[in-house]
């Protein structure tokens, strides 16, 4: 029968999950056709489960691999996603991922139509909400696009669900969403008791080496989990993601600084060795941390996000949260990638050597 799965509204997320997990079927003749709505309310129609997927969206490349349990369905990815594969552990777990083409798009999500069509994809995952200029080249080439939106945990669960549907593995998403929901609710329950005057100002630095960027709170996933674990977004006054200078950081004087995992050469010395930044509360209390790089970078939403929340919770509110992050990582990697993490693997993911003598970081080291 024709399988009809509708994910038309964020407000219907729970119903969408229920429909997926129950294998909601539309009436019709026997076929493997998959039809669903993407996050721009466009109909996505696949003759059968996608066997060749290109992810122009950066984090979704590793998510597709995790959902499928292999690299066989991913035939193209963003070069920034490729760098995470080569720099992080995903390239160790799935060495063949290093050979997946990344010339299908520029880092700015503009498709390279010639390279894209050469991969002969069944489905191309692209950003929605960013204009038709990055979508039209895909659809004009006769390819099927699935558009996703960024910024909230709800949106993340939706597009992960759509990807599992497109892969013909709707059953796969259930345990991953349940994990996300369980960890989120546990953190929320513990964070409720934290008084406002005990919530530190936390600055996430999105870029640092070529320029410095920070973001306001609206639509900012980093701000969302900072607040989730009992912190406050130090750059909440900003409208969107903007370039800032070190003097602005000094004015905010954050209690905690989180450095992005996108810039491989960025480490905590960027703060400690700087004449201005070294005077911030975060530097003086040794609360400067580089975001981990696992199957993907832990900064943005991805399949490993609950690990990122627990890591951040232990550091931002160490008196409230005592998660066994190393143990949680071993369990999660077995579920996500069927991979047994070694202690050395965990040290690499958490940058235990690069974090220096950061406050409370010994909790993440092997005793």
Image: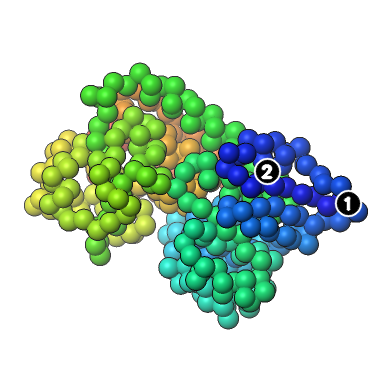
Q: In the rendering, at what x and y percent does residue 228 appear?
A: 39, 32
Position of 105 relative to 161 (above/below) = below
Tag in front: 1 or 2: 1
Helix, strand or loop at label 1? It is loop
Q: Is residue 131 visible?
A: yes
User: Is 169 positioned to the left or the right of 244 in the image?
Assistant: right
What's the distance in space between the residues labelled 1 and 2, CA to CA? 25 Å
Name the residue located 31 percent from the left edge and 27 percent from the top edge.
Answer: 318
**How many numbered marks have been drawn onto this rendered protein structure?**
2
Q: Earlier in the sequence, mark 1 or mark 2?
A: 1
Which color mode does the image show? rainbow
Marking on residue 335: none
- Residue at which label 1 appears: 28
In the rendered image, residue 239, in percent from the top left (x then y), is placed at: 30, 50
Q: What residue lies at 35% left-to-right and 18% top-to-bottom?
A: 193
Q: Which mark is residue 172?
A: 2
């Amino acid at each position: 029968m024709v399988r009809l799965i509708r994910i038309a509204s964020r407000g219907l997320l729970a119903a969408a999950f229920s429909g997926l997990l129950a294998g909601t079927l539309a009436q019709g003749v026997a076929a493997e056709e998959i039809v669903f709505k993407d996050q721009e309310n466009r109909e996505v129609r696949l003759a059968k489960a996608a066997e060749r997927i290109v992810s122009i969206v950066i984090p979704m490349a590793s998510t597709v691999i995790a959902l499928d349990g292999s690299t066989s369905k991913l035939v193209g990815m963003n070069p920034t996603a490729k760098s995470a594969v080569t720099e992080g552990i995903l390239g160790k777990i799935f060495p063949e991922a290093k050979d997946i083409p990344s010339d299908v798009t520029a880092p700015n999500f503009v498709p390279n139509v010639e390279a894209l069509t050469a991969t002969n994809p069944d489905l191309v995952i692209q950003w929605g909400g960013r204009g038709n200029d990055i979508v039209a080249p895909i659809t004009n080439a006769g390819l099927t696009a699935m558009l996703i939106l960024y910024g909230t945990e709800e949106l993340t669960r939706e597009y992960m669900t759509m990807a599992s549907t497109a892969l013909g593995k709707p059953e796969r998403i259930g345990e991953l969403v349940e994990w996300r929901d369980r960890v989120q609710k546990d953190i929320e329950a513990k964070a409720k008791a934290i008084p406002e005057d005990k919530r530190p100002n936390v600055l996430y630095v999105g870029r640092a080496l070529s320029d410095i960027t920070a973001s306001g709170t609206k639509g900012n996933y980093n701000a969302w989990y900072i607040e989730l674990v009992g912190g406050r977004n130090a750059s909440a006054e900003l409208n969107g993601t903007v370039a800032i200078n070190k003097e602005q950081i000094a004015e905010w004087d954050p209690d905690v600084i989180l450095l992005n995992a996108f810039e491989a050469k960025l480490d905590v010395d960027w703060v400690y060795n700087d004449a201005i930044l070294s005077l911030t509360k975060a530097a003086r209390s040794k609360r400067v941390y580089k975001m981990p790089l696992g199957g993907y970078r832990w900064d943005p939403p991805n399949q490993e996000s609950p690990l990122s929340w627990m890591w951040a919770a232990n550091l931002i509110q160490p008196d409230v949260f005592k998660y066994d992050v190393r143990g949680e990582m071993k369990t999660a990697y077995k579920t996500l990638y069927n991979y047994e993490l070694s202690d050395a693997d965990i040290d690499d993911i958490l940058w235990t050597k690069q974090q220096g003598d950061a406050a409370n970081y010994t909790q993440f080291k092997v005793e």
